[in-house]
Image (tube, helix red, strand yellow):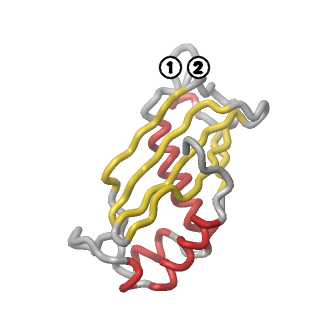
Amino acid sequence: MESVTVIHPRYAETDQMGVVYHGNYITWFEVARSDFFKALGYSYRRLESEGVILPVIEVGCEYFKPALYDEPVEIKTTVKLFKGVRFGLSYRVYEKASGELLARGFSHHAFTDKDLKPVNIKKINPVVHQIILKAMEARQWKKDD
């Protein structure tokens, strides 16, 4: 499964040349991650209200071409990693008008309780475990994600 998030780069996210600052991509990944969970039918907010949080343990981004002010981008998100207490997503950022790949990134997370103690999602929430497994099986791109 893949979710799609559309971002319209704001002026505040760019430099004087209208190029999006590289750190904003990480913020966009967070927006895309929230949208991904909504697309699964199990929102991030719901997961947190049930006592499970997903702190970031690693994040990265590879840039190919700059995103520009007010030129919409699409972020396609899919599951990259899913093991007991670890979870990872892959993100691809495309220029919406041309479909050209601008950047590729990832975020890795730990399933934890509110005290940041690792939890096995399969044991504490089998429904979420199954939803994520199905999303991983249905991902549309696998190479270099």
Whether 110 is drawn above or below 124: the answer is above
Residue for point 33% across, 63% down: 110
Residue for point 61% across, 75% down: 41
Residue for point 62% across, 25% down: 68
Q: Residue furthest front?
A: 143
Q: Residue furthest right?
A: 97
Q: CA distance from mark 2 to mark 1?
A: 5 Å
- Is 33 on the left or on the right of 96, as rendered? left
Give 73 or 110, whichever is nearer the viewer: 110
Residue for point 49% across, 41% down: 105
Residue 40 rendering spot, x and y as whole percentages: 61, 70
The three-letter code of the residue at mark 1 reads: Asp
* Mark 2–mark 1 CB contact (< 8 Å): yes
Q: Residue furthest top?
A: 17
| Residue designated by label 2 | 18
The C terminus lies in quadrant:
top right
Tag 2 secondary structure: loop
Residue 70 rendering spot, x and y as whole percentages: 67, 30
The three-letter code of the residue at mark 2 reads: Gly
- Is 120 on the left or on the right of 130, as rendered? left
Residue 120 rendering spot, x and y as whole percentages: 33, 77
The N terminus lies in quadrant:
bottom right
Dot 2 alpha-carbon crowd within 10 angstroms: few under 14, some 14 to 19, many 20 or more: some
Tag 1 secondary structure: loop
- Is 45 on the left or on the right of 5, as rendered? left
| Residue designated by label 1 | 15
